[in-house]
Image (cartoon, rainbow, N blue to C red):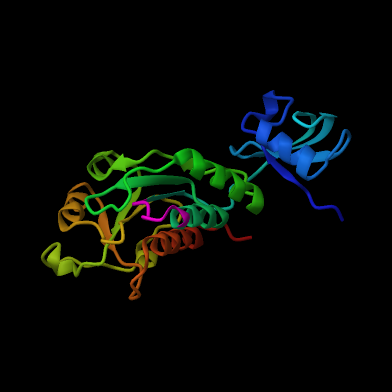
Amino acid sequence: MKETRFFFVPDARNCIELPQDEAKHATRVLRLAEGDELMLMDGSGCFYRAYITVATGHRCLYKIFDFLPQERAWEGHIHLAMAPTKLNDRTEWFAEKATEIGMDELTFLDCQFSERRVIKTERIDKILISAVKQSHKAWKPILNEMTPFERFVKTERKGDKFICHCYAQEDIEEGGTKPLLMDVLRRGVETTVMIGPEGDFSVDEVKLALKNGYRCVSLGTSRLRTETAALVAVHMMQLRNQKIG
């Protein structure tokens, strides 16, 4: 049985042609030709069955013959905010794997101890698109630009908000507790989780987050790298919100 090939076309319903990169992949790499079927995805919840009407070395035109609206595989809204790692490949690895698992939104944070203060979101967006196609996800995660920590925590957000850090909670607030994230996640609720840089958030940043409605949580007893911690947080949120049956 021939494998179904997915192509990302943001405005698929209103277009008749694959984007240049997708067209090049279809015609030059896969060697698809006129009459071959395609599966298009718009990243906004719909798949489309189409066939190629024109195929050249640079262009690939199509005609849609079936619309396939998709149901979300999870509830709520999974938003992960993280300080990008010093090495780009670790951040890119996280973006790919978290998209395969399933998340709704990704924001990069500029923190006091950040090792990287510039991120090429165009590159990350391409990785998100590739992961969406590979994992057959109907929705592409929202990707936000690098945001200063203070601005991020002071921005009003719906639902539950958490910050993960490695400090003893008594160093942050008297009588405070730091439960396991998995234990306090609520199904179907919009959720934002923040992950700091390798040097962690500063104590002042954690206290500022608390003042703005965030709760301190733990990801377990292991000390994790930034990208690993971020992936663990996404996986916990995904497991809590998966639709069963």
Q: Position of residue 9 (x, y in %)?
A: 65, 34
Residue 179's quadrant in the figure? bottom left
| Residue 37 image offset from top left, x and y in percent | 83, 39
Query: Residue 38 vs residue 88: left or right?
Result: right
- Identify the image quadrant of the N terminus: bottom right
Is the residue 66 above or below the residue 91 in the image? above
Describe residue 123's horizontal placement relative to residue 59 as left or right: left
Nearest the viewer among 198 and 149 is 198
Front residue of 144/184: it is: 144
Image position, residue 121 (x, y; %): 45, 40
Residue 87 part of the magenta segment: yes
> At x 59% / y 60%, what residue is drawn?
244
Residue range corresponding to the magenta coloring: 82-89
**Residue visible at 48% across and 62% down in the picture:** 235
Task: Check residue 141 for magenta coloring.
Answer: no
Residue 47 visible from this viewpoint: no
Residue 200 is left or right of residue 242, and the answer is left
Q: Is residue 149 left or right of residue 5?
A: left
**Residue visible at 19% across and 70% down in the picture:** 168
Q: Is residue 17 above or below residue 113?
A: above
